[in-house]
Image: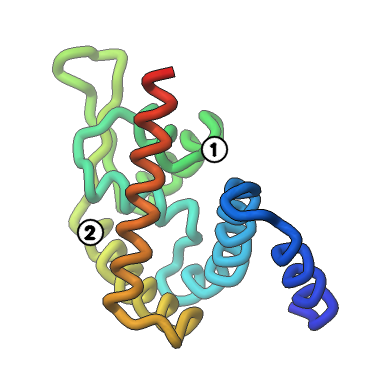
Amino acid sequence: MKKKEVDFLQQMLGQMDSPFYLSYRFIALSELVTRENDALYKNEVGLGIKELRVLRLVHLNPGQPVFMIGRWSFAEKAMTSKLVGKLCELGLLERRIDGKDARSLLLYVTPAGAEKVKAADAAAHRLFAQHFPSMSPERAAQLMGTLDELILEFVSSATQA
């Protein structure tokens, strides 16, 4: 990133009152990390961040319907279908008809998919340490816990409304 852009970002962030502009801060961090890491993941693991997000979610939650994985991978319906199709073609995911509702397809990671997740997780740990070298593992765990707490608190307040 060019120095002029960094200076602009620093100035802009300095003008934003905390905790306001929370969504902007999350989007900025997400976009910066995604842009930087997507090519690295493709080079090392053979998949981009969007594909890996779907694969990880299915790995962590096997047997979920496609719509649920799409919802929490934050991909539009058409994009979810494309990502799932690609991962199935690569032999990393498989679709199975839901025994309770034949209209629904459930997703499962194949052994090859589980190996990709393992490789991607190793790369993720290394990239996090590379991008945030001054952050200790304890501080990183605290940050992740705080982010999880914010997400769950937001969902809880939105559910009650």
Q: Residue at x 33, y 74 (%)?
A: 139
The answer to whether residue 19 is above or below residue 73 is below
Spot the residue most to the right.
4
The one of 19 and 156 positioned closer to us in this rendering: 19
Residue 73 rendering spot, x and y as whole percentages = 43, 42
Between 1 and 10, the one lying in front of the other is 10
User: Residue beneath label 2, please?
Assistant: 114
Q: Tell me where residue 18 sits by quadrant.
A: bottom right
- Is tag 1's residue or tag 2's residue first in the polypeptide sequence? 1
The C terminus - image quarter: top left
Separation (CA) of disc 1 from disc 2: 22 Å
User: Element under label 2?
Assistant: helix
Where does the image place residue 81, in percent across and percent down from the top left?
47, 34
Residue at 61% over, 52% down: 27
Read off the residue under disc 1. Answer: 79
| Pointer 2 local density, CA inside 10 Å: few below 14, some 14–19, many at least 20 | some
> Does 161 sit left or right of 103 as displayed?
right
